[in-house]
Amino acid sequence: MHFMWQVLSGCISISATLRRRGIACDPGCARCEAEEETINHAIFRCPPARQVWALAYVPVGPNSFPTESLYANVDHFLGSLNPGAQVQAFPWLMWYIWKARNACVFENLMEKPEDVVRLAVGEAFSWLQAQVKEVEEDPIPVPNPACARGVGRLGHLPTSYSGYRCFVDGSWKVGDVFADAGWVCSSFQDAFTTRGAANFRRSLSPLHAEVEAFVWTLRCMIGHDYREVAFSTDCSDLVKMVSSPQDWPAFKTYLDDMKMDMEEFSVFSLSLIPRSANVIADSLARQARSSSQHVLFVNDFSAN
């Protein structure tokens, strides 16, 4: 947040600012050769910066974002009713756009926009997870056909578990064209994360959206060849449904698909977590919902 204050108060050492202070320097932008490099240009308007915002699922356009006003662009992300309010990683995106600009100016290095987004979202994820109070909850046992073959364990993970943890969420709103899904997955061995967001034709209910999000996430994990996965959701009905499928005959088609997909995992668990612990997946789903067009994104993986 300190960097955001510097941006808004004009404290960062951009070409236009330096010239106002009487320092002789090239006023142009080193990245795109624009005639004048202002703070608004470097963080929001420069083509590499615009690519970063677009890759981070912030809709860009001449009449919406980014505008000629630095304050309007920052305000785009502030306030619950503003268009970019669901983009929780925006302070980190601003910071890493600035770092990429400095790498170009001082080291003659051109950072790829997708790498900037990956770094920023990864740092945001780590920080947001660190703010969540640790909640000790036992995973709710979920029948896994693999367990009948003596592979994997039910409910609790092995002490030496070295697989993945995947947070999943669905988003649904009356009147919207699409229902949406988001997931974020991290390895227990390192800090690397993968993530996905998609929208689908709006389903019948919020629970249907949660189920469709979970089915899609299962298939994404299989596509990544992640076969030891501890899934987490804030939807209690989804956990009950997977635990006792016979009690949910209306969802039989979905549950049959889940059963086949679950057979692909050697270790599988599904845990109920508080909504406050699922903020990243929720944010990804809401970002997908904000799009008026079809969205399908899986980090570094082409999903079919």
Image (cartoon, rainbow, N blue to C red):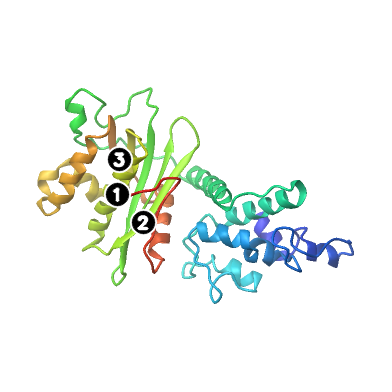
- Give the class, few, some or many, for how many residues have Cα within 10 Å of label 3's Cα (few <14, many ≥20): many
- Give the class, few, some or many, for how many residues have Cα within 10 Å of label 2's Cα (few <14, many ≥20): many
Q: Earlier in the sequence, mark 3 or mark 2?
A: 2
- Marks counted in the figure total 3
- Taking the image as shown, residue 283 lies to the left or right of residue 26, namely left
Q: What residue type is labelled 3?
A: Ser
Instruction: Determine whether 65 is above or below 54 in the image.
Output: below
How far apart marks 3 and 1 lie (CA) works out to 17 Å
Query: Residue at coordinates 21% horizontally, 29% vertically from top-left?
Result: 146
Q: What residue type is labelled 2?
A: Ala
- Taking the image as shown, residue 234 lies to the left or right of residue 78, namely left
Mark 1 vs 2: CB contact within 8 A: yes
Q: In which quarter of the image is residue 151?
A: top left
Residue topped by disc 3: 271
Q: In which quarter of the image is residue 287?
A: bottom left
Kind of element beneath mark 3: strand
Residue topped by disc 2: 198
Q: Which of marks 3 and 1 is nearer the N terminus?
A: 1
How far apart marks 1 and 2 lie (CA) works out to 9 Å
Mark 3 vs 1: CB contact within 8 A: no
Q: Which amino acid does label 1 sit on?
A: Trp
Residue topped by disc 1: 216
